[in-house]
Amino acid sequence: NVPTVPVLYEGLFDIDVIAELADGPTTLGGNHIREGVVIRPTHEQYHPELGRVILKRIGDSYECKQYEWSDSH
């Protein structure tokens, strides 16, 4: 019974779709922006040098907010 995040997209890799999904309000409830999205292949894959293949696309809004926070602290 471990909670998981919702699947926002299933389909062919499309960088424009992924970029669009990486931004916006959180899908987990609350008044927060989305940090980004995790990209996983349909079938688990391994790279000989990197290991398990899983990517994360950070949302532009989240990344800007992080820079604003670090500049002020």
Image (cartoon, rainbow, N blue to C red):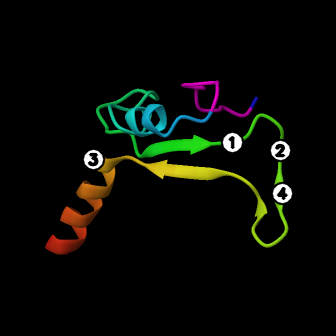
Which quarter of the figure is the N terminus placed in? top right
Q: Residues within 10 Å of mark 3 (few under 14, many from 20)?
A: some
- Cβ–Cβ under 8 Å for marks 1 and 3: no
Helix, strand or loop at disc 2? loop
* Residue beneath disc 4: 46
Q: Nearer the viewer, residue 3 or 64?
A: 64
Marker disc for residue 44: 2
On residue 25, the disc is none
Instruction: Identify the mark at residue 61; answer none if there is no mark.
Output: 3
Percent across and percent down for residue 69 are 22, 65
* Pointers 4 and 2 in contact (C-beta within 8 Å): yes
* Mark 2–mark 1 distance (CA, rounded to whole Å): 8 Å
* Residue type of the residue flagged with mark 4: Tyr
Q: Position of residue 35 (x, y in %)?
A: 41, 46
Q: CA distance from mark 3 to mark 2?
A: 29 Å
Label 3 or label 2, whichever comes before in sequence order: 2
- Residue 46 is situated, as x and y percent measured from the top left of the image, at 84, 57
Q: CA distance from mark 1 to mark 4?
A: 11 Å
Q: Nearer the viewer, mark 3 or mark 4?
A: 4
- Tell me, yes or no, whether the two marked residues, 2 and 1, touch with CB atoms within 8 Å: yes
Three-letter amino acid code at disc 1? Answer: Arg
Q: Please, what is the three-letter code of the amino acid marked with disc 2?
A: Glu
